[in-house]
Amino acid sequence: MGSFIVRVLINGLALWIASWLLEGLEISSSATEKAAANAGITEGADAAGIVLAYLFIGLIFGVVNAFVRPLVKILSLPVTILTLGLFTIIINAAMLYLTAWLSSFTPVHLTIDSFFWTAILASIIISIISLVAGLIPGARKR
């Protein structure tokens, strides 16, 4: 259970960095903004709401990667072998796009403006950050 929580935190951090670097990737929460405006609180509630929004999208992304990605990787194994593993980037972008679609049914939304460029670049950034964070002792279950 602790390993899953660490993965959600890493996913949230990776999504935050990717959305900071790429203009076409955005996470927004209408419920948090409305609640903060109604309460008259702007600074602390807004920051907490943003952090929770990234963690929520990180949770959705982790669930998608845990359940859908293995099936897609098995089904696309011949194409992945033919492209010498480069098709894995497309699979990662598709998982990010699936996360964006699933988040459209929640109060927190992940929006990607272009599947090809933004999703591909975001998947590369998220993969690199996850790889680096996986090297941290205790972040990976042994």
Image (tube, grey):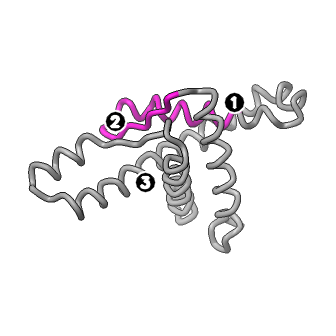
Q: Disc number at residue 106?
A: 2
Q: What residue is shown at x 54% (from left), y 31% (from top)?
A: 97
Q: What residue is shown at x 50% (from left), y 46% (from top)?
A: 19
Q: CA distance from mark 2 to mark 3?
A: 13 Å
Closer mark to the observer between disc 1 and disc 3: 3
Q: Are marks 1 and 3 in contact (CB under 8 Å)?
A: no
Q: What amino acid type is highlighted by mark number 3?
A: Leu
Q: What amino acid type is highlighted by mark number 1?
A: Val
- 5 relative to 90 in the view: left or right: left
Out of 16 and 65, give the one closest to the viewer. Answer: 16
- 35 relative to 93 in the view: left or right: left
- Neighbour tally class for label 1: few under 14, some 14-19, many 20 plus, Cα within 10 Å: some
In the image, which residues are magenta?
Answer: 90-113
| Magenta-drawn stretch contains 50 | no
Q: What amino acid type is highlighted by mark number 2?
A: Thr
Q: CA distance from mark 2 to mark 1?
A: 24 Å
Q: Disc number at residue 72?
A: 1
